Image (spheres, rainbow, N blue to C red):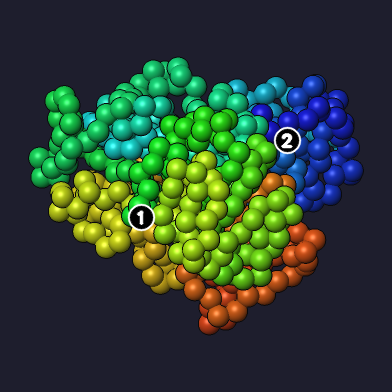
């Protein structure tokens, strides 16, 4: 499924490895039989685990060992070395893990540990008879998965306006849109998962209102759902153009699977595409459609692509990468109108286009929360435990604004991995864990063969330091505000990005 899925080679750990050959802190690639595996030494302890992340098969040998965990270099999933358990999203499934036996001067892989060891769990609060999750994105699924993993056996319902079960949203503007990822890659869980875990999944179902006092979720159709704990994970919706021609049928937005499929269908009969917006969704869509062989013109008011998030230097590199593939930029421009076969810019220039993709930002979907009287401020306000102003109601993902101890501000982040990790934390707090959400935000953005990984959060900065070479796509870019490191972006240096994540966590206790 991913580039890390390679034939197993190296020593067979079931035949034994000399202790003297494994330095403290070493990660040795090998196999157990035909299965790829890693032998990891931490002081006098040895661990043998699977070599591939269960989220897109990332190569864990290139990752980072922290205490008794290992983190994936691609998307920062984290696994326990003692039992293979998936500890942090985006991975939800464990990696293989083998019992290790030391005999004389050698260590051997023994039998596979089929099930992660039972961990200590707080008792499920007796009041928690029914949990309802509004939203079928990554946050909602991660919360449901965590609840079941943590021993919650009560009623559990996910309702979503989407017609599809939870799927991999980042892929919609990347490989899937480019045509290099098949449909079967998209579902985050197989079809039988929900029945096996006794998760009631209500697709194409909209919540009309919530009543925090009566603890009810009212549906557009059907009987209200009672809840003891409620998770709001309603996500965000695209900001729409308000110009003449914006409602034409060849104008598309990209937010959900139906949107991505509609663009793919339109691209089959198109040759010229105007992408409006030069931020992440717009430029990822531009790259994907360019890989389909379409002519791409990008229009945006910015002087440099992605400048607001990544700064001028990285933004200029992104532009160079796209222009090398034939993308044409119209920066410092805005679209005045959209015609049947063109877009007209405010400057008077007309660009031929039989397909228009708009990516000018999103806004959080907070109507349910606002009408229910929850505290709102550019999102749904939550405390450090992700609980809203209404007891028993939690909010996560694109809608949640939480107190970030590192910046001292309340922030709202629109990242897939952050949404999943918030879902996991909220689930544990429904079970009275009282766990602060302190994970450092992380996202990645891919442009052809270049991936930018970003950890932390820098709303503003007064200094940027670049170590390495932007031109060679091998660098660490650090964003400072008042001499404090706020965020790190890397290109070609995944391990440095993982190290920055760990340092951010250590600075906040997360």
Apparent side of residue 7 relative to residue 282 in the rendered image (left or right): right
Circle 1 packing at 10 Å, graded few (<14), some (14-19), many (20+), is few
Residue displayed at 56% across by 23% down: 184
Q: Can residue 375 be seen in this view?
A: yes
Element type where label 2 sits in the image: loop
For the view shown, which residue lies furthest in the left direction? 214
Q: Distance between the residues labelled 1 and 2?
A: 43 Å
Residue displayed at 72% across by 40% down: 59
Displayed quadrant of residue 84: top right
What residue is shown with label 2? 3
Displayed quadrant of residue 157: top left
Up-down relation of residue 410 to residue 495 (above or below): below
Circle 2 packing at 10 Å, graded few (<14), some (14-19), many (20+), is few
Residue displayed at 36% across by 27% down: 163
- x and y percent of residue 269 in the render? 56, 31
Q: Which mark, by number, is residue 407? A: none
Q: Can residue 64 be seen in this view?
A: no
- x and y percent of residue 111 in the render? 70, 22
Apparent side of residue 34 relative to residue 207 in the rendered image (left or right): right
Element type where label 1 sits in the image: loop
Apparent side of residue 244 relative to residue 116 in the rendered image (left or right): left
Apparent side of residue 101 relative to residue 327 in the rendered image (left or right): right
- x and y percent of residue 254 in the render? 46, 42
Counting every numbered tag in the picture gives 2
Residue displayed at 62% across by 32% down: 179
Task: Indicate which label's residue lies in the foreground, 1 or 2.
Answer: 1
Mark toward the start of the polypeptide (1 vs 2): 2
Q: Which mark, by number, is residue 243? A: 1
Up-down relation of residue 65 to residue 467 (above or below): above
């Amino acid at each position: 499924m991913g580039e890390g899925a390679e034939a197993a080679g190296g020593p067979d750990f079931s035949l034994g490895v000399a202790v003297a050959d494994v330095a403290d802190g070493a990660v040795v690639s090998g196999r157990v039989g035909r299965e790829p595996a890693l032998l990891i030494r931490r002081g006098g302890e040895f661990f043998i685990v699977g070599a591939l992340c269960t989220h897109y098969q990332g190569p864990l040998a290139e990752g980072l060992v922290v205490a008794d965990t290992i983190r994936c270099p691609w998307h920062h999933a984290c696994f326990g070395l003692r039992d293979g358990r998936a500890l942090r999203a985006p991975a939800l499934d464990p990696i293989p893990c083998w019992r290790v036996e030391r005999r004389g001067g050698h260590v051997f892989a023994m039998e596979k540990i089929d099930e992660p060891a039972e961990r200590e769990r707080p008792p499920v609060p007796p009041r928690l008879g029914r949990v309802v999750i509004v939203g079928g994105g990554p946050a909602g699924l991660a919360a449901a998965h965590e609840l079941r993993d943590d021993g919650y056996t009560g009623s559990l319902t996910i309702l979503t306006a989407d017609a599809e079960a939870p799927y991999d949203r980042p892929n919609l503007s990347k490989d899937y849109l480019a045509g290099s990822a098949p449909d079967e890659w998209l579902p985050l869980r197989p079809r039988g998962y929900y029945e096996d875990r006794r998760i009631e999944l209500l697709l194409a179902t909209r919540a009309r209102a919530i009543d925090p006092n009566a603890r009810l979720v009212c549906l557009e159709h059907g009987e209200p759902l009672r809840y003891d704990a409620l998770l709001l994970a309603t996500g965000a919706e695209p900001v729409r153009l308000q110009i003449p021609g914006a409602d034409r049928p060849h104008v598309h937005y990209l937010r959900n699977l139906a949107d991505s499929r509609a663009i793919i269908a339109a691209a089959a009969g198109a040759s010229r595409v105007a992408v409006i917006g030069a931020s992440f969704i717009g430029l990822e869509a531009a790259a994907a459609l360019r890989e389909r062989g379409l002519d791409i013109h990008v229009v945006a008011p910015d002087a440099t692509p992605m400048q607001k998030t990544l700064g001028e230097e990285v933004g200029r590199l992104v532009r160079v990468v796209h222009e090398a593939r034939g993308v044409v930029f119209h920066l410092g421009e805005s679209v005045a109108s959209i015609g049947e076969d063109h877009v007209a810019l405010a400057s008077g220039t007309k660009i031929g286009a039989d397909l228009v993709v708009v990516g000018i930002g999103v806004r959080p979907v907070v109507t349910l929360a606002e009408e229910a009287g929850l505290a709102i401020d550019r999102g749904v306000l939550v405390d450090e435990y992700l609980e809203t102003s209404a007891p028993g109601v939690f909010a996560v993902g694109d809608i949640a604004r939480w107190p970030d101890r590192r910046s001292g501000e309340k922030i709202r982040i629109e990242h897939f991995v952050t949404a999943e990790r918030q879902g996991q934390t909220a689930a544990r707090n429904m079970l009275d864990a009282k766990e602060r959400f302190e994970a450092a935000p992380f996202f990645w953005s891919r442009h052809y063969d270049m991936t930018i990984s970003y950890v932390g959060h820098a709303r503003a900065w007064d200094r940027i330091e670049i170590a390495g070479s932007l031109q060679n796509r091998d660098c660490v870019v650090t964003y400072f505000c008042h001499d404090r490191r706020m965020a790190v972006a890397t290109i070609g240096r995944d391990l440095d990005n993982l190290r920055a994540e760990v340092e951010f966590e250590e600075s906040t206790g997360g």
